[in-house]
Amino acid sequence: MKLIIENQVFGPIISYIHLVKATDVEIEQYETYQKMSYRNRFQLLSPHGVRNLSVPLVGGRDQKGRLTAEIEIDYKGRWLAEQWRSFESWYNRSPFFFHYGQEVKAIFEDRHLLLADLAMASQRWVLRQLGWNGLLGLTSSWKEDYQQDAKTEDLRNKFLPRNRQTFALRPYQQVFDLPFERNLSILDLLFNMGPQARSYLLNQ
């Protein structure tokens, strides 16, 4: 089964429940950019609840009509340093932060020019940590839908920040003594469960 999905920066757990079970994944590269998605944001847990972290874009959020593959990252300001401080502050007590943390930091510090390149780097890294050995590539053309293709599952825009809590996922131990927050970034699962993250995803 081939799976089609938009590029995401450290996307939500629900995405990886599907990705880790697929044998062939294609990332959509001919779409136009859409706001309010996981294309440039991811959600993590702070002592005060769920927080959105985003990757600033050249031209801001208004990228109407532009291909996602063309969107550039804006490296002005101190967002890289500020986000890393948030990572450390929120997750330094998680069981596997020091196992994965420096590699995650390095992905951001590579200072990819394009958002799509950062997202793909995060995608490849996560799938490697999950022991996935399928085929990962890019779409070769735009296709409106895949309803007539029984061998392809189209997950583009199925998982969005606004519907994060609609997916019932089995609780796991998180860092803070707060009610369980479901479907955060895959980083939350990796920092807390480490190598057991794969089994967690496969058993959902």
Image (spheres, rainbow, N blue to C red):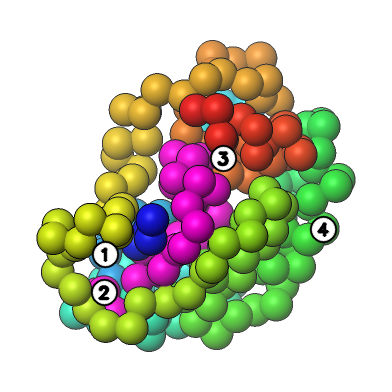
Provide the residue span drawn in magenta. Answer: 5-32
Dot 2, how many residues are within 10 Å of its Cα: few (below 14), some (14-19), or many (20+)?
A: some
Residue 99 in the figure: left or right of residue 165: right
**Where is the N terminus found, in terms of image quarters?**
bottom left
Question: Label 1 sits on what residue type?
Answer: Gln
At numbered mark 4, what does the secondary structure look like: helix, strand or loop?
Answer: helix
Q: Count the marks: how many?
A: 4
At numbered mark 2, what does the secondary structure look like: helix, strand or loop?
Answer: loop
Whichever of callouts 3 and 1 sits on the residue coming sooner in the sequence is 1
Q: Are marks 1 and 2 in contact (CB under 8 Å)?
A: yes
Q: CA distance from mark 4 to mark 1?
A: 30 Å
Q: Are marks 4 and 3 in contact (CB under 8 Å)?
A: no
As drawn, 52 above or below 174: below
Residue 138 in the image, given as x and y percentages of width and height: 42, 77
Which residue is pictured at 85% across the width and 47% down the height?
A: 99
Question: Label 2 sits on what residue type?
Answer: Glu
Whichever of callouts 4 and 3 sits on the residue coming sooner in the sequence is 3
Residue 23 in the image, given as x and y percentages of width and height: 50, 57
Which residue corresponds to mark 2?
A: 31
Which residue corresponds to mark 3?
A: 44
Q: Is residue 21 magenta?
A: yes
Of the residues tagged 4 and 2, which is closer to the observer?
2
Residue 151 in the figure: left or right of residue 53: left
Residue 30 in the figure: left or right of residue 16: left
Q: Is residue 53 visible?
A: no
Rendering quarter of residue 26: bottom left
Of the residues tagged 3 and 2, which is closer to the observer?
2
Residue 197 in the image, given as x and y percentages of width and height: 67, 36
Which residue corresponds to mark 1?
A: 34
Q: Are marks 3 and 2 in contact (CB under 8 Å)?
A: no
Which residue corresponds to mark 4?
A: 102
Q: Is residue 147 visible?
A: yes
